[in-house]
Image (cartoon, rainbow, N blue to C red):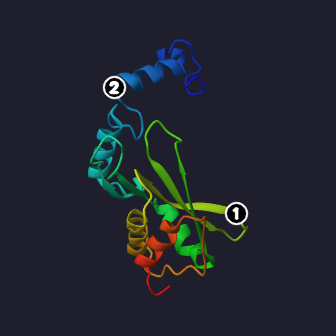
Amino acid sequence: MRKDYEIKECKLYFVTKKDLWNVMTKYKLTQGLRDRDDITSLVSGEQERNPSDGIRFFKKQDEPSGKGFVLVIITPRQQRWLDQFASRGIAVDDTHNVTKYALKLATVMVIDDHDRGLPTAFLLSGEMTSKKVKILFDEIKKIVPNFAPKSLLSDKALAFYNGFKSSFPDR
């Protein structure tokens, strides 16, 4: 702001980053944060149906352990990557115990023309079962109708392969 208002007589010259942060916090202007409660914020985001958020599927948890919770995120950029690069093959893996919640995060990756891995879809779930993974691949199927990877790379967990085969039995 000081570059735009070089004259010290203008009040905007004296505004600091901390001032802006305080205004944003006071009036809840934090981008993407709709509520202090994560679930309430997520429900609000899902109801907005903003395509750039990438929320493709959302189901709230049935119990405090996180079971029943399912969130699939595929942004428009990730959709383009899936469409453009998935034919070479995909890799799927998950992590767990990386947040304060008892949720697992699965990521679908593709390789671009420069052999760099690109994350193209995320599944956040209380449990990583083939049924939950099928939800992820069903969402991919909806937005990328010609999705036909030559190979599927995963770890020893059969949930990814079985979920993929449930959505794409002919591949």
Q: Gap between marks 2 and 1, in whole Å?
A: 40 Å
Is 28 drawn above or below residue 165 in the view shown?
above
Per the image, label 1 sits on a secondary structure element best described as: loop
Q: Is residue 96 left or right of residue 49?
A: right
Mark 1 belongs to which amino acid?
A: Arg
The image shows residue 119 at horizontal and vertical percentages of: 57, 59
Q: Residues within 10 Å of mark 1 (few under 14, many from 20)?
A: few
Give the residue displayed 46% in from the left and 62% down from the top. Answer: 76
For the residue marked with disc 2, what is the amino acid?
A: Tyr
Q: Nearer the viewer, residue 163 or 119?
A: 163
Rendered image quadrant of residue 151: bottom right
| Nearer-N-terminus badge (2/1) | 2
The residue identified by callout 2 is 27
Q: Quick one: SS at disc 2?
A: loop
**Residue at the spot of label 1:** 116
The answer to which image quadrant residue 6 occupies is top right
Residue at the farthest right position: 114
Residue toward you, 92 or 88: 92
The residue depicted at 51 percent of the width and 61 percent of the height is 77
138 left or right, relative to 115 = left
Q: Quadrant of residue 50?
A: bottom left
In the picture, the quarter occupied by the N terminus is: top right
> In x, y percent, where is residue 143?
41, 72
**Residue 15: x and y, percent?**
51, 18
The front one of 109 and 166 is 166
Q: Are marks 2 and 1 in contact (CB under 8 Å)?
A: no
